[in-house]
Image (spheres, grey):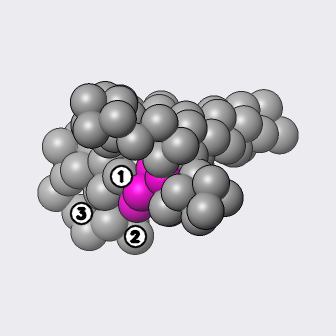
């Protein structure tokens, strides 16, 4: 039961980050489609910044789960955020 709740929170965290990434691409992109903007960001070295901005939505999901007293789901969102931080670090420095 606990693992299921953490997994649900983890999936919510990944989805929230993906939606945040798409929103960041639309906000900070120069009018191109998503694929072009992501390729350009990888080439110019600011993809990790877009992913980090996208992770802001995880903050909302985390506090919603905390407010609803769903601590294990909040733990899953936190786990997803840590995974995204490690991914961002690897993309930036490797």
Disc 2 to disc 1, C-alpha distance: 19 Å
Quickly name the residue at label 3: 32
Left or right of 41 in this view: 88: right
Q: Earlier in the sequence, mark 2 or mark 1?
A: 1
Disc 3 to disc 1, C-alpha distance: 22 Å
Question: Can residue 22 be seen in the rendering of this structure?
Answer: yes
Q: Main secondary structure of the magenta part?
A: helix
* Label placed on residue 24: none
Residue 73 at x, y = what percent? Answer: 48, 47
Marks 3/1 in contact by CB < 8 Å: the verdict is no
User: Label 2's element?
Assistant: helix
Q: Earlier in the sequence, mark 3 or mark 1?
A: 1
Residue at point 64%, 35% (across, down): 82
Seen from the viewer's position, the closer of residues 91 and 62 is: 62
* Label placed on residue 35: 2
Front disc: 3 or 2: 2
Task: Write down the region rendered in magenta.
Answer: 9-15
Disc 3 to disc 2, C-alpha distance: 8 Å
Residue 10 at x, y = what percent? Answer: 54, 54
Left or right of 81 in this view: 51: left
* Label placed on residue 16: 1
User: Label 1's element?
Assistant: helix
């Amino acid at each position: 039961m606990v693992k299921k709740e953490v997994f649900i929170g983890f999936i919510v965290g990944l989805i929230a980050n993906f939606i945040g990434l798409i929103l960041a691409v639309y906000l900070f992109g120069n009018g191109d489609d998503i694929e072009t903007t992501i390729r350009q960001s990888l080439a110019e070295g600011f993809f990790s910044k877009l992913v980090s901005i996208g992770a802001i939505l995880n903050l909302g999901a985390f506090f919603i789960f905390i407010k609803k007293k769903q601590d294990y789901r909040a733990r899953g969102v936190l786990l997803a955020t840590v995974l995204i931080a490690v991914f961002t670090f690897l993309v930036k420095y490797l």
